Structures are given as structure tokens and as C-alpha cells.
Image (spheres, rainbow, N blue to C red):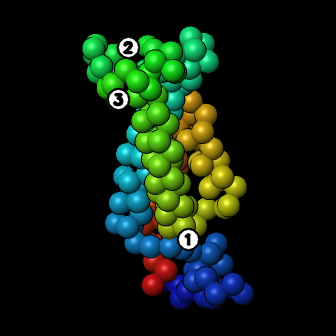
Amino acid sequence: MTEPVLDPAGAARPKGGKPKRRFGGTHAQIRSALTFYKVLAYATGVMLLLVVVEMVAKYGFDSEIVAGGGAFLQLLPEVVAETAGGVNLSTAVLIVHGWLYVVYLIADFRLWQLMRWPFGRFVLIALGGVVPLLSFFVEKRVHRQAEEDLAAHPEAAPRY
């Protein structure tokens, strides 16, 4: 068995081999962050699709989506929606999506930090929550890449 050697950056590597991969946390922490990211990616994707429905109603039909106030769901003009009673779902969807996207960015940052990926990947993952349907595809790819990285480096030393 060869002794590990420190390269100039301080990473342990086998003699004559490539540097050992280092993560920002343990495999369990990374898998936890990956699950948190996955849940938020799907939730953000669904909310973004609801935002698209809300925008079509608002700008295509000049209406707000209202729950209650005489019917289960109604499309009402903005002026009428304010006085019709019930809950304005158009406003609720926008608020919920906005806050959910903030939590999605936190999940994205946590996973990026633990995996020690390049900054560009953080930005690309963040854009997944902005373009409708993209979060589903980005999540699948990110999940696969993280799992492959973890499987390829079971010996990877945690940061601490």
C-alpha cells in the first residue's frame, strides 16, 4: 500500500495518483442536502407552473383567480376580485412562489457548498427555479451528478 502524499494545495493523494476528492461535509450530510434540494425543486417547479397559469389569467383574460365568494373557483376582473370576498389565489400564488424560491436558493447553496462544485453550477441550478419546467430537469441531472460523485469517491474525506 502506498503512503498518501500531500500535493501543493494540501489535498491528500496516493503516490503518483490524482488528488483525493474532498467534500464540504459527510456523505450523510450531502444526501440530506440532496433530499432537501429535491423536495424544494419539485415544489418550486409546481409553484412556477401555477404562476404561469396566474399570468395567463391576468394578462390573457384580464382576470384574477378567486376561491370562494360565491363559487369554488372564479375568474373575476381585478376590480371585482377585490370586493367579491373569498381568497385571491393569484396574489397567494405569487407570494408563496416568491418565498419558496428563496428557500430553494438556500437548498441550492447548501448542496453546492457541500459538494464543492464550481460557482457556475450554483448559478445554473438557481436558474432552474426561474424557467417553467426547468427545475424538474435540472433536479434530475443534479441528483444524478451528486450520486455519481458520491459513489465515485467513497473514500473522500469530509472537511472536518
Among the two numbered marks 2 and 1 on one chain, the one whose residue lies closer to the N terminus: 1
Relative placement, left or right, of 45 versus 17 is left
Q: Between marks 3 and 2, how big is the CA–CA gap?
A: 10 Å
Instruction: Work out whether residue 16 can be spotted.
Output: yes
Which residue, given by chain and number where applicable, does mark 1 sit on?
21
Q: Nearer the viewer, residue 77 or 51?
A: 77
Residue 46, by quadrant, is top left
Is disc 2 surrounded by few (<14), some (14 to 19) or many (20+) residues within 10 Å? some
Tell me the quarter of the image containing the C terminus. Answer: bottom left
Q: Relative to residue 118, is residue 75 depicted above or below?
A: above
Among the two numbered marks 3 and 2 on one chain, the one whose residue lies closer to the N terminus: 2
Q: Nearer the viewer, residue 56 or 118?
A: 56
Relative placement, left or right, of 85 versus 119 is left
Which residue, given by chain and number where applicable, does mark 2 sit on?
74
Q: Amino acid at mark 1?
A: Arg
Which residue, given by chain and number where applicable, does mark 3 sit on?
87
Identify the residue shown where x is 64% and y is 87%: 10
Q: Position of residue 125 (x, y in %)?
A: 59, 48
Instruction: Work out whether residue 149 can be spotted.
Output: no
Q: Relative to residue 128, is residue 29 depicted above or below?
A: below
Identify the residue shown where x is 62% and y is 56%: 122
Frontmost of labels 1 and 3 is 3
Q: Secondary structure at mark 2?
A: strand
Q: Secondary structure at mark 3?
A: strand
Identify the residue shown where x is 67% and y is 61%: 118
Is disc 3 surrounded by few (<14), some (14 to 19) or many (20+) residues within 10 Å? some
Q: Secondary structure at mark 1?
A: loop
- Asked whether the beta carbons under mark 1 and mark 3 sit within 8 Å of each other, the answer is no
